[in-house]
Image (cartoon, rainbow, N blue to C red):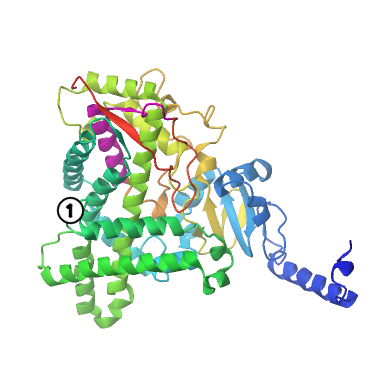
Amino acid sequence: MSLLQLYPALCVSDVVWVVALFALLYGLVYAGERRDLVLPPGPTPLPIIGNLLNMVGADPHIRMTQMAKKFGDVYQVWIGMEKVIVINDIDLAKEALVKNGDDFAGRAHLPTTDLLSNSGMGIAFADYGRGWRIHKKLTHNSLKMFGNGMQQLESRISEEADWLCSHIAASAGRPLDPYLGLNVVIGNIISSLCLGKRYHPEDPEFRTIVRYNEGLVDTVGKDGLIDVFPLLAKLPNATVRKMKECLELRNKVLSKNIEEHRATYQDGKIRDLIDTLLKAQAEAVMASGHRALRHLSDQHILITVNDVFGGGMETATTTLRWILLFLVHYPEVQDRIQAEMQQVLCANDPVRLSDRERLPYLEATIREVLRMRPVAPLAIPHVTIRDTSVGDFDVPQGTRVMFNLWAIHHDERHWTDPATFNPDRFLDAKTGQLLRGGSFLPFLAGCRGCLGESMAKAELFLFTARILRDFRLELPDGVSPPSLQGRYGVVMAPDRYDICFRPREEQL
């Protein structure tokens, strides 16, 4: 049956006009590239939707990895009417992120990220510029992830590890979902750094924080069409509505904490990140008047605190859940880690960050989990702030760029049998010591690299070591191993699961 038979009222001239309109649109959007540029290859886009059909059938990071096998380590796709360059190789990623880091340091303005960041405030979703540099420097100085700062962080993690192991021990070996306990301890570490307080698990404010964080993780990235076709965000939409409800809760909690800090702030006594930002705000106002609020308003402070709090809480919790899940799947890895710890540590000795070099297999296991299941397989998209290049290709100013960490971490040119869980790949076969480098970039790199990298590494090592020192991880009787597939979203997380924490009979 022909088109004219289906629509008898549609004349031939109408069809011609429609075809002509689509051809014009295609030419303006997709074919209007500068002829003097050497652009990456990629699939041919369709009008309006671009290459969205090429993404059907698998999670985006999987489909983009498959496309790299056809089009190469750098290729371009059209997400709707937006051109996106995808980088799938470790050396090219480092070229863009480190060697030419400033060129690739911009951020895209998307409906969901604009909602999260109040149109580009804070650190995570702020565009490259003076405001972003101010907040990054203040945050870096406040976290103090070096010297005495690392010692204080280690002490805080150890205190939370005590609580976590007590919480686990109370389960008496019965099936337990580790999600809540991990959320509490990671949340309290980041809360102490940002808000200067520790929450009881049943504290109403803490439960609100957990609720809005879970809501944002559940909504951001869930309805990807909103970011592809921004006009959809203007229409009635359950995802956007839930996101806005969560953001209202977030703003209420953080505004309350900011005002409490303002009321109790004492000059010269910096307690946490909020105090650091309020001090900078006051000094800037004294020096420049209210013009300083262009970058240091209360709303800017709120968004920066949220970026550190929300980002640090969700990513570390998710990674620890992946670690525990892989250890349940691979009991022989557990055995080897515990044997290593028993050989290195004295009975009941606390595990310290200084033990990382003495426990290389434990550290290698953590790295292998980060390789196998990067929390953000495609990271946060970057945008070029000037004409630049990567590899043999030109990248015009304003181009969105994605770093496919999944492809980088599963690159067969660098890893033997990359789909297999094997911590030994991070160890020297002769010395047994940790190997550096490799096709491995879990925290990105360069000026947009993760500010909390040192803190995250400390949390992952100390919590994992303490749990394995005190407990044996097993599946409940008659229960099949939980899936290692993961759910793609703002973070790639495993499904919720229960495991049994059996107290170890012998103490190290």
Q: Quadrant of residue 308?
A: bottom left
Q: Residue visible at 38% across and 68% down? A: 245
Left/right placement of residue 459 relative to residue 237 reads: left
Q: Is residue 358 above or below residue 137?
A: above
Query: Which image quadrant: the C terminus?
Result: top left
Amino acid marked by disc 1: Arg
Q: Residue visible at 36% across and 62% down? A: 123
For the residue labelled by badge 1, is the local secondary structure a helix, a strand or a loop? loop
Query: Which image quadrant: the N terminus?
Result: bottom right
- Residue 26 in the image, given as x and y percentages of width and height: 73, 67
Q: Residues within 10 Å of mark 1 (few under 14, many from 20)?
A: some
Q: Residue visible at 26% across and 56% down? A: 207
Q: Quadrant of residue 24?
A: bottom right
Q: Nearer the viewer, residue 314 or 451?
A: 314
Magenta residues (range): 454-479
Q: Is residue 289 above or below residue 490?
A: below
- Residue 383 in the image, given as x and y percentages of width and height: 51, 61
Q: Nearer the viewer, residue 499 or 398?
A: 499
Q: Nearer the viewer, residue 381 or 183?
A: 183
- Residue 461 in the image, given as x and y percentages of width and height: 29, 36
- Residue 319 in the image, given as x and y percentages of width and height: 37, 42
Q: Is residue 402 magenta?
A: no
Left/right placement of residue 18 relative to residue 291 reads: right
Q: Nearer the viewer, residue 430 or 195?
A: 195
Q: Is residue 471 magenta?
A: yes
Q: Which residue is mark 1?
A: 198
Q: Is residue 232 above or below residue 173?
A: below
